[in-house]
Amino acid sequence: MAKKNKLKKTLVEQILDKANISYQSLALNALKNELPDDIQKEDIYKTLALSGDKTGPVIGILPLTEHLSERKLAKVSGNKKVSMIPQKDLQKITGYIHGANNPVGIHQKHSFPIYIDKIALEKGSLIVSAGELGRSIKINSQELANFVEAEFAEIKE
């Protein structure tokens, strides 16, 4: 591969390299439905930032094709209710813009509780943002959960 064609590693990829966690770099934009033929939309996971009435920020990770159950996330996170953090406040709270939120970067900067829908554990791997729009990583679900201290739970509708 020619040097100028090689993608510069994102901060998330650098963190994973340092921790000796294997992943596959992907250049795709799920927000624009620009997916290679070998990747299905249900393999891509969104990282949602919510605020709990008792815990403050809480992170939920589930397939793009699914809807988050705020009731289920509230229950597993020890809250009575949770609500989405407004987009205008997202970068201030998580450090990332809409579409670039990712569990690795958020965990490095904050100790927010992270919950991954248990379907990711059943599938064995998932694709999440690499911290920049148009960049993602495919990673083993259990390794990611261990690294970011996430819990698997039923959080989708």
Image (spheres, rainbow, N blue to C red):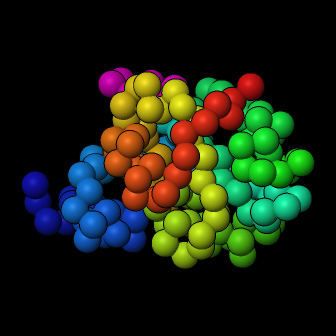
Q: Residue at x 64, y 31 (%)?
A: 154
- Which range is magenta? 36-43
- Where is residue 149? Give x, y as percent: 49, 57
Rendering quarter of residue 155: top right
Q: Do we see residue 64 in this rendering?
A: no
Magenta stretch: residue 137 in it?
no
Q: Residue 20: percent from the left, percent from the top?
A: 22, 62
If the image is split into quadrants, where does the N terminus sit?
bottom left
Nearest the viewer among 89 and 123 is 123
Q: Residue at x 47, y 32 (%)?
A: 120
| Foreground pick, 10 / 18 | 18
36 vs 72, left or right, is left
- Residue 34 versus residue 133 in the image, above or below: above
Q: Please, is residue 131 above or below residue 46 in the view?
A: below
Q: Is residue 150 visible?
A: yes
- The spot of residue 29 in percent (x, y) is 49, 44
**Apparent side of residue 39 relative to residue 109 in the rendered image (left or right):** left
Which residue occupies the extreme left position in the image?
A: 1
Q: Which residue in the rendered view is the most extreme toward the front?
A: 78
Question: Could you tell me which residue is drawn at 27 percent across and 66 percent down?
Answer: 19
Q: Looking at the magenta stretch, what is its main secondary structure?
A: loop
User: Quarter-wise, where is residue 16 in the image?
Assistant: bottom left
- Residue 87: x %, y % from top left: 78, 60
Decide if residue 153 is on the left or right side of residue 127.
right
